[in-house]
Image: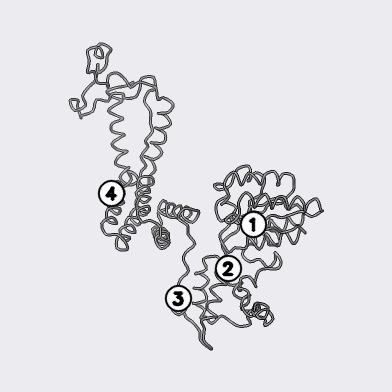
Amino acid sequence: MVDLFQAAGLEEAVGRPLADRLRPQSLADVVGQDNLVGPDGTLTRLLESRTLGSLILWGPPGTGKTTVARLLASQTDLHFEQISAIFSGVADLKKVFEQARARRHAGRATLLFVDEIHRFNRAQQDSFLPVMEDGTVTLVGATTENPSFELNAALLSRARVLVFHALDAEAVSRLLSRAEEVEGKALPLTLEAREALANMADGDGRAALTLAEEVWRAARPDEVFDIAGLSEIVQRRAPIYDKSEDGHYNLISALHKSVRGSDPDAALYYLARMLDAGESPLFLARRIVRMAVEDVGNADPQAMVIANAAKETYDFLGSPEGELALAQAVVYVATAPKSNAVYTAFAAAKKAAKQGGSLMPPKHILNAPTTLMKKEGYGGGYRYDHDEPDAFSGQDYFPESMGRQSFYHPVERGFEREIRKRMDYWARLRAERDPR
């Protein structure tokens, strides 16, 4: 029966996915990675010098990492061997290495492409080192995660990291135009819907072509979809986001820096993206409190109050109603006057504490619950501030051998302007009453 189906050409009728049919046949056909494959790109120069070396290809899904690895093998006349860290173990690696050694003895080198290389554990990553060093394989690893965090330092020191970027709108548009040429027909989309489809791909070329296939399958003769029709046909592609990996850290970094940079619109955008991707609202609430403490501080003490209130409101209302409280807090913290004076002061105080951790506080501020401690001078000479003029004695509270230190320097913004006035006032009184 299988032979009859094959004879009938059923395999050809089923066809290959559009993304596979459009796989570039040369580096010049790769879109969106001009920094690597353009006329002055890194890979272009490497190939001209004929010194490829081991590489780590780092970038989002659907940006051409696997395709580039295949083309590199082809253009350097290396045998292309591909494995996936998801499906391979120690036994698989040993087999691949043995085959590469045999191939090398026969006069042909191997380009070993390892997809999702970050999923190998440290010991498995170390197993690549000997075969990289003796030239058994030229390793090309692909990862969507930051190699600095996920790969051994020893492995990274032997490979060059090349960064692949998510496809921009122009690159996706070129990809769709190429798909139309191959299919021999235009996408049945309005201009606005075409732009929306490109946005749905989220910089992933493979996803863009898959969405295009869905549109062609769904369209009836002479039917053209607008944005609403497109959304109905393809439903919606989930954002590329893994709460335990780079997408998580990149977006929370973008949110925090937008708040720090006093840009409430950008902050709301990243907050919405993270919530839309399924991030824990309570994680976001904690981060907003941290932003209020770290970047606003005493310039507007109310920022921390509002951030905490947003967390309590979300606890009370839940999703989606409580998300509005998080948005309110983000806007408040983003538009508040900024100061990291407490943040830097505490860091300086911690450093001083580590350096002088064994220094004893001055005896006059220590309690003396026993007669012996009183004889030793504990509590002697202490002046109770509330009994002093202006409720301020001006005593020195630092360890005697340390001397007075200055950690906290309020800025001339928001409420810290008032705090600076208070500190200056106490500094003048201290100089008058305790001139040391």
Q: Is tag 4's residue or tag 3's residue first in the polypeptide sequence? A: 3
Could you tell whether 222 is left or right of 282 in the image? Answer: right
Q: Position of residue 365 (x, y in %)?
A: 27, 22
Q: Label for residue 83?
A: 1
Residue 178 locus on image (x, y percent): 63, 75
The x, y position of residue 305, in whole percent, is 28, 49
Residue topped by disc 4: 305
Which of these two is toward me, 184 or 367? 184
Find the residue positioned furthest to the front: 1
- What's the distance in space between the residues labelled 3 and 1, CA to CA? 36 Å
Q: Nearer the viewer, residue 205 or 103?
A: 103
At x 58%, y 44%, the residue is 122
Measured Cα–Cα span from mark 3 to mark 2: 18 Å
Q: Measured from the top left, where is residue 69 in percent x and y?
A: 67, 59
Residue type at tag 4: Val
Residue to which mark 2 is pinned: 206
Q: Considering the numbered disc 3 on the image, is that residue within a helix, a strand or a loop?
A: helix
- Give the residue type that dot 3 points to: Ser
**First in sequence: mark 4 or mark 2?**
2
Pointer 3 or 1: first along the chain: 1
Q: Residues within 10 Å of mark 2 (few under 14, many from 20)?
A: many
Tell me the distance, in whole angstroms, between the alpha carbons under discs 4 and 2: 46 Å
Mark 1: amino acid: Ile
Q: Which residue is mark 3?
A: 231
| Classed neighbour count for the residue bearing mark 1: other residues with Cα under 10 Å, few (<14), some (14–19), many (≥20) | some
Tell me the SS state at disc 4: helix
Tell me the amino acid under the disc marked 2. Answer: Arg
Q: Quadrant of residue 58?
A: bottom right
* Disc 4 from disc 1: Cα separation: 53 Å
Q: Quadrant of residue 273?
A: bottom left
